[in-house]
Amino acid sequence: MIRLHHTGYVVASIAESAPEFAESMSLTWDGQVIHDPMQMVNVTFLPFNDPHHATVELVEAAGARSPVRKFAESGGGLHHVCYEVPDLQQHIARSEAAGCTLVRVPLKAMAFNGRKIAWVKTRAGLLVEFLEAAPTTV
C-alpha cells in the first residue's frame, strides 16, 4: 500500500517556525529536532491528532553545503511530498519509467530509524521522497 506520509516545508529556523505551524494548523509539536548529517538537514515532525493523516515535516539547513540552504534563504516553503512505499526499488523504477529523474539514491534516514529514502523529480518539477515502509511484524 502506498500512502502520503508527509509534506515537507523548508524553513529558516525550526525553533522559530514550529510553534506557528503547530498553532495555525492545530498540530502538536514535541520539540524534538533530528539532525541528519547524510542529508545535511535538521528536521522535525508535527503530526495531526489522527494517525491516518499525513504529517507535516519542517526542514532546516544544517550548514553551508545543505541542499536546502538556498531555498531557505529565499523564504522557503513547500519543498516536497513523501510517500511511504512497500518496495522502494520498484517505485524508483516506476517513476523513472514515467519520466521522473532520480536525484538522490536510496540512503538510510536518521528521521526514520534507518529506513531508506530516495528522491525523484517529476517531469513537472515536483520533488517526491519515497520512504520504504516499516517492516511488518507477525
Image (cartoon, helix red, strand yellow):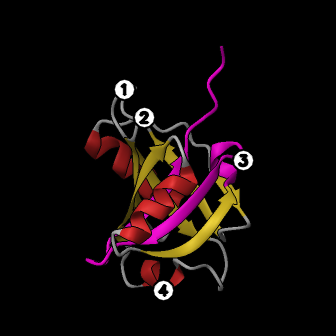
Placement of 100 over or under 31, stated as above or below: below
- Decide if residue 77 is on the left or right side of residue 31: left
Mark 1 vs 3, N-terminal side = 1
What amino acid type should be assigned to the residue bearing mark 2? Thr
Residue plotted at (61% across, 79% down): 66
Q: Nearer the viewer, mark 2 or mark 1?
A: 1
Question: Which residue is disc 4 drawn over?
Answer: 70
Outermost residue on the front side: it is 97
Mark 4 vs 3, N-terminal side = 4
Q: Nearer the viewer, residue 93 or 135?
A: 93
Q: Quadrant of the N terminus?
A: top left
Q: Nearer the viewer, mark 4 or mark 2?
A: 4
Does the CB distance between marks 2 and 1 fall below 8 Å?
yes
What amino acid type should be assigned to the residue bearing mark 1? Asn
Instruction: Report the Cα–Cα distance between label 3 and label 2.
Output: 24 Å
What is the x, y in percent for residue 69?
53, 81
What amino acid type should be assigned to the residue bearing mark 3? Gly
Placement of 125 over or under 25, stated as above or below: below
What is the x, y in percent for residue 6?
41, 47
Does the CB distance between marks 3 and 2 fall below 8 Å?
no
The secondary element bearing badge 3 is classed as loop
The magenta stretch spans which residues?
A: 109-138
Question: Which residue is disc 3 drawn over?
Answer: 114
Question: Which residue is disc 2 drawn over?
Answer: 28
Question: Which residue is disc 1 drawn over?
Answer: 49
